[in-house]
Image (spheres, rainbow, N blue to C red):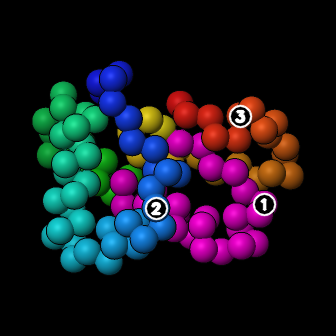
Amino acid sequence: MSNDISFFLKDLPIEKLEDILALSDEDRRYYFMHLIKRFYPEIEDKDEKDRLVSNYQGSFELEYILRTEPVIAKVFTCVYTKTGLVREVSNDLYFIPDAYQYQIN
């Protein structure tokens, strides 16, 4: 992964997120493959790329749910990677200080 570039999923406008999720399966895979080439250029194995495509798909869908479901958004905090993936979602019941709520790992 290159250290000089990043993609913060939390900053993607909701309209763009909806557009990406509305793409055909083929076009969405093509989009995710570009992210993989950008952030994981060393990955050449097809199975590993397929796994990353699935992780991007899941991350984008989870981000959409977190933004559009007020109850979920109110009680969960998302931790992201620098490559546009959701790393984890934490229940706020277990309190994450504000300084770490949008921690990028």
Specify the amino acid type for callout 1.
Val
> x and y percent of residue 98 in the render?
78, 38
Q: Please, what secondary structure does the residue beneath circle 3 have?
A: helix
Q: Please, what secondary structure does the residue beneath circle 1 have?
A: helix
Residues tagged 3 and 1 counted as in contact (Cβ below 8 A): no
Main SS, magenta region, reads: helix
> What residue is drawn where x is 70% and y is 64%?
73
Q: Does residue 104 show up?
A: yes
Where is 72 relative to 102, above or below? below
Compare marks 2 and 1 and give the one earlier in the sequence. 2
> What residue is drawn where x is 52% and y is 51%?
10
Q: Cα distance, mark 3 to mark 2? A: 22 Å
In the figure, residue 68 lies in which quadrant?
Answer: bottom right
Specify the amino acid type for callout 2.
Pro
Where is 16 relative to 76, above or below? below
Query: Which residue carries the number 2 mark?
Result: 13
Give the class, few, some or many, for how many residues have Cα within 10 Å of label 1's Cα (few <14, many ≥20).
few
> x and y percent of residue 50 in the render?
23, 52
Compare marks 3 and 2 and give the one earlier in the sequence. 2
Instruction: Judge depth for marks 2 and 1 and give the one in front.
Output: 2
Which residues are drawn in magenta?
A: 56-80
Query: Which residue carries the number 1 mark?
Result: 75
Query: Which residue carries the number 3 mark?
Result: 100
Between 33 and 43, the residue placed more toward the observer is: 33
101 left or right of 63?
Answer: right
Specify the amino acid type for callout 3.
Tyr
The total number of labels drawn is 3
Between 12 and 87, the residue placed more toward the observer is: 12
In the figure, residue 82 lies in which quadrant?
Answer: top left
